Image (cartoon, rainbow, N blue to C red):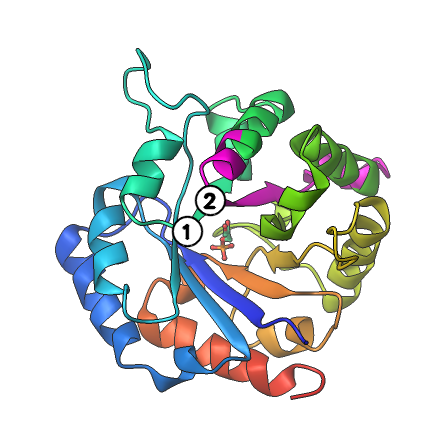
């Protein structure tokens, strides 16, 4: 069975409840997201998480949180637990985004604790990895990314791997000042990650999504590579039309579709 192609967005620190509701209403009516060859997902800020879960509950679109603590409860002011994320109705939790590694000092070891806590709570961790421009220039891109993956997955039992998603997001490609990776560069790293990671208990490779300045113009050549299992989009999907346009073009470019 071929896996659906993952297409999703993190809204990062954007959208009021009203804006979130409008976005979900547009997705709700989109036939494209009901196509079994696609798996859509939306990752709103915590403030909109339960509303978005409710608004998309009768669609196949999955919903995720942007981060969480590893403890189930306790004296951790300002944090959100795996239980709370699950209680909102989320399926996914994004962990280790480079903005969190950079601005909130998230370490590989902390991400590993979060991955295990997410799996224990029945969530799908979406683990973000990626090298900085400096690491790339020094020839350490693959070493960095593979180290991040290995530490994130340390101690995860093989039966749980089928719920793990990886997003390769080179730091130099993300955001307003980012330069998107070429399909060739992204494909090369995706193959390195595949070679280095364990497979699921059924022998399937872990899905590795690409993120970093994905837009309607570059999505087709990225989606055309069989080793890229999905696209994780920021700015270009913050309007529902953007997400849908990318989904449509990516699907058309997907091998075998
Ligand atoms: O960080 C990203 C998704 O997590 C990508 O953001 P941009 O698509 O805005 O570069």
User: Marks 1 and 2: CB-CB under 8 Å?
Assistant: yes
Q: Left or right: 8 with respect to 17?
A: right
Q: Residue at horizontal 71%, vertical 83%?
A: 255
Badge 1 crowding class, 10 Å Cα cut-off, few under 14, some 14 to 19, many 20 or more, is: some
Q: Position of residue 248 (x, y in %)?
A: 49, 83
Of residues 249 and 60, which is closer to you in this image?
60
Q: Left or right: 168 with respect to 15?
A: right
Of residues 201 and 248, which is closer to you in this image?
201
Q: In this picture, which residue range is highlighted in magenta?
A: 117-141
Q: Residue at horizontal 49%, vertical 69%?
A: 39
Any part of residue 215 in sight: yes
Any part of residue 216 in sight: no
Quarter placement of the N terminus: bottom right
Q: Residue at horizontal 75%, vertical 66%?
A: 227
Residue topped by disc 1: 91
User: Residue 252 colored magenta?
Assistant: no
Q: Left or right: 14 with respect to 7?
A: left
Residue 123: give its label.
2
Residue 158 vertical position relative to residue 248 in the rendered view, above or below: above
Mark sitting earlier along the chain (1/2): 1
Of residues 177 and 186, which is closer to you in this image?
186
């Amino acid at each position: 069975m071929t896996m659906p192609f993952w297409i999703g967005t993190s809204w990062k620190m954007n959208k009021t409840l009203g804006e979130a509701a409008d976005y979900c209403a547009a997705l709700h009516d989109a036939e494209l997201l009901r196509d079994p060859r696609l798996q859509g997902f939306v990752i709103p800020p915590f403030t909109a998480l339960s509303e978005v879960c409710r608004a998309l509950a009768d669609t196949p679109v999955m919903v995720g949180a942007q981060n969480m603590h590893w403890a189930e409860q306790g004296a951790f002011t300002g944090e959100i637990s795996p239980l709370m994320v699950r209680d909102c109705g989320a399926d996914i939790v994004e962990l280790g985004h480079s903005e969190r590694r950079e601005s909130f000092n998230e370490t590989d070891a902390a991400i590993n604790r979060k991955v295990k806590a997410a799996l224990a709570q029945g969530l799908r961790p979406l683990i973000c990895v990626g090298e900085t421009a400096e690491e790339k220039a020094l020839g350490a891109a693959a070493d960095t990314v593979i180290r991040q993956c290995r530490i994130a997955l340390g101690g995860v039992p093989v039966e749980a791997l089928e719920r793990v998603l990886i997003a390769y997001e080179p730091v130099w490609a993300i955001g307003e000042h980012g330069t998107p990776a070429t399909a060739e560069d992204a494909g090369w790293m995706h193959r390195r990650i595949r070679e280095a990671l364990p497979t699921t208990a059924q022998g399937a490779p872990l899905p590795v999504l690409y993120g970093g300045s994905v837009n309607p113009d570059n999505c087709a050549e990225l989606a055309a590579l069989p080793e890229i299992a999905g696209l994780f989009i920021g700015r270009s999907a913050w309007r529902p039309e953007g997400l849908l346009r990318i989904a449509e073009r990516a699907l058309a470019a997907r091998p075998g579709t």
